[in-house]
Image: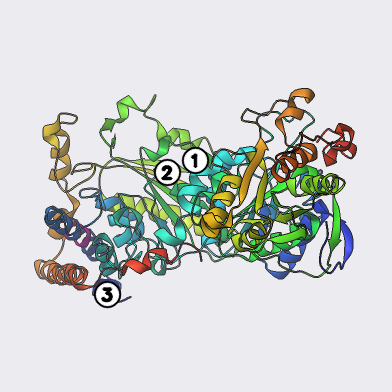
Amino acid sequence: MTTSTPEGRLLRYVDALCEAFAQEMRRDENVFVFGLDVDDHKAIQGSTRGLLAEFGPERVFTTPLSEDAMTGVAIGAAMSGMRPVHTHIRMDFLLLCMNQLVNIAAKARYMYGGTVSVPMVVRSMIGKSWGQGAQHSQALHSMFMHVPGLKVVAPSNAHDAKGCMIAAIRDDNPVIFMEHRLLYPTEAYVPETPYEVRPGKARVVAPGDDVTVVGISNMVVECLRARELLAEVGITAEVIDPIWLTPLDLDTIVDSARRTRRLLVADNGWTACGAGAEIIAGVLERAGPDAGIAVKRIGFAPTSCPPSPPLEAEFYPNPGTVAATVHAMVRPQAAGWVPDPERTKLAYQTQFRGPF
Amino acid sequence: MMRPLIAQAPPLEPTVRLYRQLRLIRVVEEEVARVYPTDRIKSPVHLSIGQEFVAVGVCDVLEPRDHVSITYRGHAAYLAKGGDLRGMIAEMYGKKAGCAQGRGGSMHLVDLSAGVIGASAVVGTSIPVAAGFALAAKRRKTGAVVACFLGDGASEEGCFYETLNFAALHKLPILFVCENNGYAIHEPLSKRWATDRLTERVATFGIPAERLTDGDVFTVRNAAKAAVEAMRASGGPAFLEVACYRWQEHVGPNQDYDQGYRPASELAPWVADDQVPRLAGMLDPSVVERIDAEIRNAVADAFAFAEETPFPDPEDLYDHVYA
């Protein structure tokens, strides 16, 4: 991760989130954090650690396993002027919240003629590997991108995790906040004072001329590793992190893709009707046919996520598949190139040890 | 938005107050039914004719600081809590001056200045949202309560039980009021409920629960008054199941006893015990005459306003997608 002006301390993603909650709760007593396990001894992998002690059980509390109603409670509290942060230990559970999120949270501002706002954050974690399997691994951001009225954010590093969370809490709209479990131990420079990484601005995380690679959530990290592998064969990839998926900063991606004339979107979700499809369609519509931009999507295999390691390795894109795909786009006439598998393991594979 | 004259009236004896609200709602709904075939109302209407006494009895004991959560069959509760009449009718006409600027329609009435939380057309969905308002009231120690109206159909949704549990666990100041009219669209309770013991089911959450079956607006008012007073004193939810009857078809301005799914004989006792003429008979005729005249004027004014006030501009489409 590179930031234009590194400042602050090296902080883990999980601790950056926790710092955002604590600072916002000190600033605004309307902010509260709730959801199953936020107040237990494990504190959602540490992301809510210390909040109960500082802010008490009225502002930091667990819930019954009633995701549907708890989402409605958050919405009602938000309409009343509170700022709830509803926490889910896996994004898969958001499927139990869809009625409230899609039928009320997203529509209330509109359907009630601008007389209410719903300033709430729905944070959820995506699991990966160590046998997470089909129902603990889904990244459902594209479902939420489909619905007007919701904002969707998927920060890829500790700096953005804090800044996006603060921006999300201060936002007067419902924000779906997507956290990748494997990013939790990753470190970045994080300013101590509160700051916002505001909606609708992407970041060019690494420059390049041959191809534009958009990574979503943890795929930003894998794309940066692919970029290193590609550099060794003389291909420079520009890596862009959209950060906010709604509102989406298409301009930054269009500007880059016009220049490189190649665009790859690496998603941590399925490609069908996915964020990659939306980004590519948006870029091509805006740039027009004369821009001559070649496009490619990669993401989850069109299967459910299997827990068995060899199957799972085939399921996920990795730095090797990203790099090989880019190579084929940039040098279509050349023989297929695949980097050394030993060097294309996913970032977590050298760091992460279960269980969760 | 201009408040109707009616809402500005000074406090009166309960009977006068209850009659005024019952009569207002009845006249509004009958006018909606009358106008509906002209196609000037641009929204499906779910009339509450015959059920008004539930909302009127409950809302009579509420204060301006309190909220109500209403259903898609919510005209009665909206008006009973003091929701703006002009805004309601204009909304049904799809006009910009509507309570939701023409973005809600009949099924999404809202007037937060009167404490009316926006209604949902997805049955039961507004129940936990109401609990969220109650949670905020408790946190802020405002002493306010929330009355959450729901139908017997909504009591079958999972989020109803989830909300009962949470409200009881957190001692939220919320009064759940189930308007049990015996039908979900066209399906009777007997085809939907394993047992007709909703009140007993709710009581197992440790929630004071009472079933009212006499169709009397005073019975409803007294039960709501006791529940709300207890709630303001010590917090904690309460539940009322109120038997009532939907006189008109599920959606639309007509009656549907010729459709075969319910007999007109079910309606007869409710008409015989109609609370609107009953309360009129309890008052001095001159008082009734005065109230009726005021209501006629207010309703005529609201419909005239809805007719005349402009539609939204097409370019308004994108307003309010985000705050």
| Mark with earlier residue (1, 3) | 3
In the image, A38 versus A354, the foreground residue is: A354
Question: From which residue to which does the magenta span run?
Answer: B23-27
Q: Is residue A87 magenta?
A: no
> Looking at numbered disc 2 in the image, what kind of residue is underneath it?
Gly
Seen from the viewer's position, the closer of residues A292 and B176 is A292
Across the whole image, how many numbered discs are drawn on residues? 3
Residue at which label 2 appears = B124
Element on which disc 1 rests = helix
Dot 3 corresponds to which residue? B9
Which amino acid type corresponds to the residue marked 3 in the rendered image?
A: Ala
Q: Are marks 2 and 1 in contact (CB under 8 Å)?
A: yes
Q: Chain of mark 1?
A: B
Question: Marks 3 and 2, how far apart in space?
Answer: 33 Å
Q: Position of residue A79 (x, y in %)?
A: 51, 61
Point out which mark residue B159 bears. Answer: 1
